[in-house]
């Protein structure tokens, strides 16, 4: 069952089956016909044989009965027993015939009745003859009935003979008929064989035709399918409608078409991908064949060449735009263009050319600068088949580079114009650039080696500067940033100079040290001025010292001896003389005070300024405590606000507050109720303080005079004082980097302001 | 004991000598006041040299020392005293016109016992010297003599 189901009706099977079927049919038909003919022949021969044996038997029986009858008759008639001999000889033959007849009758259907009848008759005849013989022999004489007996026997024999004759005749007829049938059968067999062969031949022809039709259909289908597939219709599938070798062949073709289709799809995808990549990259790509005709060019190639997308030339030529030499801007001949050179086998590496786009597009565009790399293309045998070029638009870089150059020139000019010596060194310490001031500072010794023949020493200590201590070296080697190191230098043929050297390391984009910039400022003049100033200050100090010591001594003596005079001669002096002595003492003391104030003021400008956080609130409290003796017995109304903290010298700032508040107390002396306000606030980058009073005030036109040394707006009689307090305030505030100013109205009051720089850390 | 010791006044200005002597006299101090007119004179007294070669070897009760002096300054005299094992314990009081910070600073650095600025006003000067005398000559216990 399974076999049938899975059985493939291949063409070979069909063909073989058809051939075998034809042969089998032929053999079968012929065989049947021959067999049947042979059977018939045998049957016919048997029946003929039978007929002949039957006829022979009939003859036998006839002769036997005749002999019996004759013997009996002769005996009967003669009584002579001699006649009985033939009889007796004939009886076994007759009995034998009888047995044969009976057996024949059993098999012989046509004359069965007649044969039985014949056998019966023969038996009767024998029985009669036996009886007649016996009776005759017993009576020995025969009465009248001998004749009767002979006639009876005769009659019996005749009847037998008659039946025999009829039977012979019938048998002969039968034989004839059988022979006839045998002949007919033989003819029929011949016909059957003939027709059978013809039929087999016909079947064969029919099967062949059917198979041929199948074959040619399949071949035609295959041919058509193969043609369609061959023509590129790779999605076509051949269907022969059968499950045979042609179907196999079709499947192979279909599979091939499928694979081809997939390969073609993959190829198309790859081509699409390549195209997409080619069109999307920023670099221009152009490919030419061996005739210089463009095979491929992408958007970027069009953009870089300045040629609109659709107008790209078919082949390289000088007509479209112009390729220019980088150096002289002359047009490059076609055969020297990078693609042409590559097409002739040259490797064109990183050439820079200018492209002037073709008019009209080129009118509004300048030259594009393009970086080109071109390579020859070769086939499998190595023969040149064209060239490929990759172009990068470097116009922007070039422009940027030019701008960079301009900026560099600008920077160089700036550096060149700078009044300080600038040296730029590379990572190896070699000086790359020195400006004019640098050359003036160092002489020509900075061109090659950093410090060459220059002698250097630390200005303050006089110790020589070791090679590794030079600021430029430290910046290059250690990445140090050095600010304003004071050294002395002496270059060959030049005088000694004091130089403030600074150096900053230079780093590349990855942070590695790539050199350093050194800035040197010749401060020899400044140093000498400073030294001069220091000397002057020292002298001033000595002078002040001398003043404080030597100038006060005589004053003290004046007062001292006036006192002694009064002590020893007071009783002898009149009122007037005593007043003179008092005046001498008072003048001496006043001068002593003046000297003290002046010394304090002088000291204020020279003593070093501290800078610490200062609570102005606390300083004000201290100042008020200090002024307690001055406020004693006064009617004063205080308005004291919170003061912002500052940075500065607490002792000096305290003196500022003491002076200002003391003034306020002094100048409100004649008010029934003196009002003094102290306030402070922050104003931008400054902390501003104000001491205000409702005292005598001043005329604003003298406001700037107020802060001058020994400048007074009131007589000593009105208000005592040396005129140095506000000058001291201004000096202290100026030294702190602040400002002082005043506002006032005569007889209404005055307000004195000072400000100090605000530092962020002050705002706690 | 103390009364037996001298007071050394180192002062170059005769006016100041006179005024100072006057002030010291007000207390009727029994101590003899020796006046040295410059720094070297002062050291001569302390080391019993030159004109003081014949004096007894007792050290002074205390020294009133001006700063601005001919030859050796008061600070140099102070340094010499403080660096001498035998003299270093002698009380030294600076009596000077100078209010200069540097003078104050150096004096104390060198181990001065007191620093008094001569007041300009005579009355104040008298009071100051009187108090110095009373304190150092009477109230204060001096280091033992060895």
Image (cartoon, coloured by chain):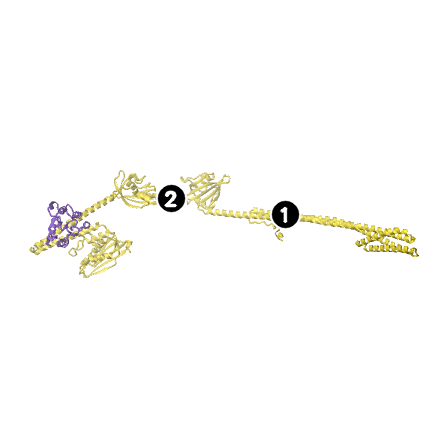
Would residue A358 be visible to someone looking at this image?
A: no
Q: Return the mark for residue A12.
A: 1
Residue A619 can be seen, yes or no: yes
Q: Nearer the viewer, residue A695 or A590?
A: A590
Q: Chain of mark 2?
A: A
Say which colour chain A has: yellow
Question: Residue A715's image quarter?
Answer: bottom left
Q: CA distance from mark 1 to mark 2?
A: 84 Å
Query: Which mark is in front, 1 or 2?
Result: 1
Which chain appears purple?
B
Do the residues marked 1 and 2 share a common chain?
yes
Residue carrying label 2: A401
Give coordinates of residue B31: x percent, y percent: 11, 52
Seen as rendered, the residue at the extreme left is: A572
Name the outermost residue toward the front.
Answer: A138
| Residue A632 vs residue A63, the one in the foreground | A63
User: Is the C-beta separation of discs 1 and 2 under 8 Å?
Assistant: no
Residue in the foreground of this view, choosing between A380 and A608:
A608
**Which quarter of the rendered picture does the C terminus of chain A lie within?**
bottom left
Element carrying mark 1: helix
């Amino acid at each position: 069952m399974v076999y049938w189901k899975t059985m493939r009706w291949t063409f070979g099977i069909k063909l073989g089956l058809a051939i075998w079927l034809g042969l089998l049919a032929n053999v079968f038909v012929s065989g049947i016909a021959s067999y049947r003919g042979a059977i018939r022949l045998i049957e016919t021969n048997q029946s003929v044989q039978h007929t002949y044996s039957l006829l022979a038997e009939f003859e036998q029986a006839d002769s036997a009965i005749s002999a019996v009858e004759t013997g009996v008759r002769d005996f009967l008639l003669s009584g002579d027993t001699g006649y009985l001999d033939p009889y007796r000889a004939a009886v076994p033959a007759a009995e034998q015939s009888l047995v044969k007849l009976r057996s024949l009758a059993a098999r012989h259907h046509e004359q069965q009745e007649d044969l039985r009848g014949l056998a019966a008759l023969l038996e009767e005849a024998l029985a009669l003859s036996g009886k007649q013989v016996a009776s005759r022999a017993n009576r020995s004489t025969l009465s009248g009935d001998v004749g009767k007996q002979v006639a009876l026997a005769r009659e019996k024999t005749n009847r037998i003979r008659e039946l025999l004759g009829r039977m012979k005749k019938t048998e002969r007829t039968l034989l004839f008929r059988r022979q006839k049938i045998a002949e007919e059968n033989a003819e029929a067999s011949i016909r059957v064989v003939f027709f059978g062969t013809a039929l087999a031949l016909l079947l064969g022809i029919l099967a062949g035709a059917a198979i041929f039709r199948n074959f040619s259909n399949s071949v035609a289908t295959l041919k058509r399918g193969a043609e369609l597939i061959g023509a590129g219709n790779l999605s076509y599938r051949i269907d022969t409608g059968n499950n045979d070798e042609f179907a196999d062949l079709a499947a192979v073709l279909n599979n091939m078409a499928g694979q081809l289709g997939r390969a073609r799809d993959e190829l198309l995808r790859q081509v699409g991908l390549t195209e997409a990549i080619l069109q999307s990259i920023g670099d221009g790509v152009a490919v030419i064949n061996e005739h210089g005709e463009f095979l491929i060019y992408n958007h970027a190639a069009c953009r870089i060449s300045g040629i609109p997308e659709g107008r790209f030339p078919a082949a390289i030529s000088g007509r479209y735009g112009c390729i220019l030499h980088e150096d002289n801007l002359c047009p490059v001949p076609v055969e020297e263009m990078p693609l042409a050179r590559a097409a002739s086998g040259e490797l064109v590496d990183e050439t820079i050319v200018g492209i002037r786009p073709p008019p009209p597009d080129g009118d509004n565009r300048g030259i594009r600068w393009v970086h080109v790399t071109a390579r020859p293309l070769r086939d499998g045998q190595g023969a040149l088949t064209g060239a490929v070029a990759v172009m990068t638009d470097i116009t922007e870089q070039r422009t940027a580079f030019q701008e960079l150059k301009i900026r560099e020139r600008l920077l160089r000019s700036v550096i060149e114009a700078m009044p300080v010596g600038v040296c730029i060194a590379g990572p190896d310490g070699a000086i790359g650039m020195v400006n004019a001031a640098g050359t003036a500072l160092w002489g020509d010794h900075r061109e090659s080696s950093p410090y060459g023949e220059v002698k250097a020493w630390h200005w303050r200590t006089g110790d020589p500067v070791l090679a590794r201590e030079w600021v430029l070296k430290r910046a290059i080697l250690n990445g140090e940033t050095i600010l304003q190191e004071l050294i002395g230098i002496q270059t060959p043929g030049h005088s000694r100079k004091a130089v403030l050297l600074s150096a900053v390391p230079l780093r590349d984009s990855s942070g590695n040290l790539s050199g350093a910039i050194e800035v040197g400022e010749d401060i020899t003049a400044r140093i000498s001025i400073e030294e001069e100033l220091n000397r002057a200050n020292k002298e001033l100090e000595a002078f002040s010292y001398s003043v404080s010591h030597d100038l006060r001594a005589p004053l003290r003596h004046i007062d001292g001896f006036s006192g002694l005079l009064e002590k020893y001669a007071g009783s002898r002096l009149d009122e007037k003389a005593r007043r003179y002595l008092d005046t001498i003492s008072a003048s001496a003391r006043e001068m002593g005070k003046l000297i003290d104030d002046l010394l304090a003021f002088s000291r204020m400008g020279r003593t070093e300024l501290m800078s610490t956080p200062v609570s102005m609130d606390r300083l004000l409290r201290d100042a008020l405590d200090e002024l307690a003796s001055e406020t004693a017995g006064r009617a004063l109304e205080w308005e004291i606000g919170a003061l912002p903290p500052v940075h500065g010298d607490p002792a000096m700032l305290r003196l500022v507050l003491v002076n200002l508040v003391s003034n306020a107390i002094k100048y409100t002396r004649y008010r029934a109720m003196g009002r003094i306000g102290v306030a402070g606030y922050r104003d931008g980058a400054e902390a501003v303080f104000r001491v205000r009073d409702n005292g005598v005030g001043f005329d604003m036109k003298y406001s700037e005079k107020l802060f001058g040394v020994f400048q007074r707006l009131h007589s000593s009689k009105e208000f005592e004082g040396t005129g140095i307090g506000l000058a001291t305030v201004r000096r202290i505030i100026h030294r702190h980097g602040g400002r002082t100013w005043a506002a006032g109205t005569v007889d209404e009051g005055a307000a004195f302001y000072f400000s100090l720089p605000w530092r962020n850390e002050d705002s706690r | 004991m103390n009364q037996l010791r001298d007071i050394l006044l180192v002062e170059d200005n005769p006016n100041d000598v006179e005024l100072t002597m006057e002030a010291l006299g007000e207390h009727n101090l029994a101590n003899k006041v020796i006046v040295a007119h410059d720094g070297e004179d002062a050291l001569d007294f302390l080391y019993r040299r030159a004109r003081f070669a014949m004096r007894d070897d007792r050290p002074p009760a205390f020294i009133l020392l001006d700063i601005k002096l001919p030859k050796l300054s008061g600070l140099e005299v102070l340094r010499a005293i403080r660096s001498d094992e035998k003299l270093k314990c002698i009380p030294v009081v600076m009596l000077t016109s100078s209010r200069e910070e540097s003078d104050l600073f150096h004096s104390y650095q060198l181990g001065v016992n007191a620093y008094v600025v001569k007041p300009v006003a005579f009355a104040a000067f008298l009071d100051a010297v009187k108090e110095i005398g009373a304190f150092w000559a009477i109230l204060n216990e001096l280091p033992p003599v060895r």
